[in-house]
Amino acid sequence: MTIALPAEAAVQRRPFKIDMSWPVLLAFAALLCVLIVLPMSWLVYYSLVDKAGAFTLGNFVTLFSEPEFRAPLVTTLMLATSASIFCCLAAAPMGWLVARTDLPFANAVRALVTASFVTPPFLGAIAWELLAAPNSGLLNKLYRHLTGAEMGEHIFNIYSLTGLIFVISCYTFPYIFVLVANALDRIPGDLEDASSMLGGSAATTARRITIPLALPALLAGMLIAFLQAMTLFGSPAILALPAGFHTMTTKIWSLFQFPPKPELAAAASLPLLVLTVMLLRAQHMILGRKGYSVVGGKTGDPRLIRLGVWKWPAVAVVFGVLMLPVFLPYFALFNAAFSPIATTLVTPENATLKNLWFTFSLSSTKIALQNTFVLGALTATLGTAMALVIGYITVRRAVVGHQALGFLATAPIAIPGIVLGVGLFLAYTQPPFVLYGTIWILLLAYLTIELPAAFQQLSSAYKAVGNDLEDASRILGATRLQALRHITAPLLRTSVIATWCFIFVATIRELSAAIILFTSDTKVVSVLIFDLKESGDLGAIAVLGLLMLLLTFAVVIAINRIPGFGAAQRLRNT
Amino acid sequence: MASVELRGLTKHYGPLAVVDNVSLTIDHGHLVCLLGPSGCGKTTTLRLIAGFVEPSGGEIRVGDRVLSAPSRTVPPERRNMSMIFQSYALWPHMTVAQNVTYGLELRKLDKDTIGSKLKTILATTHLIELADRYPGELSGGQQQRVALARALIVEPEILLLDEPLSNLDANLREEMRFEVRRLHDQYRYTTVYVTHDQSEAMTTADIIAVMNLGKIEQAGSPEEIYERPRSEFVARFIGMSNVVRGKALDRDHISVAGQTLRCVGDGLSAGADTAVSVRQHVVRLCADKPQSTENILPATVVRQVFLGSSRDYMVEIADGTQIRVVATPTENMAPGSSVWLHLPPERCRVLAG
């Protein structure tokens, strides 16, 4: 082709313009591979070799034949199944009451559910230990005080499978509650009105219309609850180990205690990984089925059902249930923080600040706090930055192959924290990358764990800004970068701040991966709490736990108050 | 001179040719409408001209510069064009004035020039009082005018409009059609206007290019397209046409349902299957058999609707083809009654293929 026209000069001003899209794509693809593909490959490799490095299926044979390993597997499945059923029984009626009836204090209920949502499960487990340990538990003491029963008698024993199921349910039910309440919020009132117009009574309408429409959300919520219960490390480590049994996660952890057996740990991690992937697929299918999506059109507000005489009993039951994940544990933590002995009731006479002094005088506290803040801030900053770039590339289809980046950025959602911990341990204790023992390996773990949520949040923010807004600026003479700076950046600011805060909060409470990857110099607060538990310093745990909660609530409330965050409406002015 | 020339322009997405070998010349100062149903490739053609999409084949020239070719595409910001988006794409974080002056600021004009140009354009588009509002606080029609002002203030060589009126309600849409034409007559930018609404195209365009399945079916003045559609697609898409089918008898006669019709168009070859289009309002409806026998088809009334200024008939001829007829309101024939249709020979157009 000959392009020798004089007016071409203007066009050819920058003849050596380098196409930056390929380097960018490759750099990010490589980074994501280091974060995800490398550890997972090592995981699979280790599960298939023996100590000498020869190929074997022996690890899996051991895993499924020896009772030492089979028992935790069975326990975990029982635990996850019953926890998801319990959660469903508690959360579904609550979700319905809040979304569909004139229940008083509905907003307070939502806020309290959020509170149990953001409470780190291991902290809840420790709080319940304070409440319901057979001898020292506050509730058991109260029982003995009221009935005059002998020392040693108890009504609650938290160190049991039942106790563990109960505590896990306390901090897992919000997943179901949120999904169900949101689904019910979104069902247009017209659908129910249409049923009433055709002669359906309130009960018929609920049975034939409302419940079937909310059912997919409920099922999806149960799967998530199952997943959560299956992959938790903190609560079983705190409650199952003293009771003398193992779940899969604690078993994997114990394989890293002396003498370490990484091959077996890798083999034990794979079933968790496979189950997680399968459950997420199932959840996707349930929620994605077209027949269940609510068909558009103008929709009315849902009609609230009058509870009548049941109003106050309902309130009593809901708040009674919320005692378990929120009021009682928080009280126990406060009590432990200011009482001379963690499991003695605090009174104005014996209240003390010695736990505070003790906690902050520990040298490990200082290191852990510092590590936690540095890692939290670094993870949040790097994670947000990565999600910004990957989100831009995938949403704007900026380069060929953007789908692969999107897939890689979402994939970690299917990797349970402890499995990722094992994978990273295997990948970075040997050349070419030796990171074990530094805080960088924790940074990698946190980044990987938080990336999917950050990516999803910022992708939807990009989608909300829309292509046209950027294109309009391009056609008026702005370069790609100018368009990003003038148009996209200001519109994205609140989402970026919110994403940063979410990552920060999620990072400081992470335990499952950190417990495999920490060393004494790289302890973080969650690991320190776990350690203090082993040495029995419940007062210090309570102080650190409250600090963590305080920080979490401060950030969550701040996000909800960001000016303009609620004004996302304005983005859709067209 | 900002004439635009598309030469064999093609865009593939995978195996699918969204724009398929499109060639079109737009003279300086003309307004061309790309008209077609959704999915016909008109918006992709527009985005190709704007430079948001790279062509897979062919090229786009403005004057004697090649702006787009598969090997090299000038980015949109260096094309000196303006575009009005279907969604208006007003930036929600900027006021009307900030939105409108954005392009001038990128061109680094001094403050006074920007101020005076802003005043002029806001006056032209009746937006003076709204200068400090945010887009979220404007009505649809006002947002539309801001989008126009923002595109016009930079004095582009070429103005692109992507279904600019489709988000407005019916009355406002009608008003804005004339507004677009008025502004075009005032500024005389070379303009490409994409729409699926034929009356919008009729009102605004110098040239209409009817697109279907990624190709231009026919391009010409509104009269030409309307009076002399070249394909069944164009005949059906533009205005209200009936299409009857039959076998050609000789150069200008076809046999339809046992009757002979004389028509006009390119010479027919005897024996070929042929389609003929005739507008709904030129067909005459008679209750009694007319004297003349040329171009008369017997038919039965299927239904009729009284529309005030006219009556809308659906009738069926012997081969089962249904024909719509717009008749005067006084001709009242009940469904089921036999009627005779007169199809004026000079208005029966032979369609290609």
Image: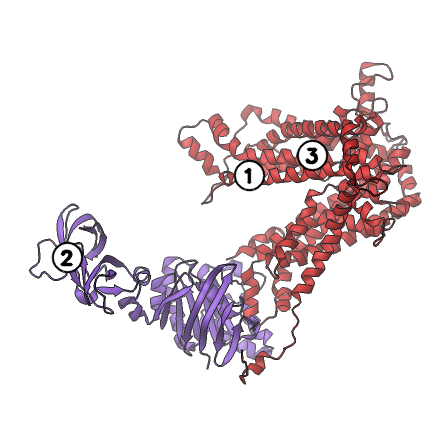
Chain colours: A red, B purple
Instruction: Give residue B218's position: percent from left, percent from top.
Output: 35, 68
Q: What kind of residue is marked 3?
A: Thr
Chain of the residue under label 1: A
Hey, which quadrant is residue B353 in on the image? bottom left
Q: Which of pointers 1 and 2 indicates the residue nearer the eye? A: 2
Instruction: Give residue A564's position: percent from left, percent from top.
Output: 62, 54
Q: Residues within 10 Å of mark 1 (few under 14, many from 20)?
A: some
Hey, which quadrant is residue A420 in on the image? top right
> Along the horizontal axis of the image, is A64 left or right of A362?
left
Q: Which residue is disc 3 drawn over?
A: A172
Q: Is residue B72 visible?
A: yes
Residue occupying image coordinates x 85% and y 30%: A346
A54 versus B331 height, above or below? above
Q: Is residue B120 visible?
A: no
Dots 3 and 2 on the same chain? no
A109 versus A159 height, above or below? below
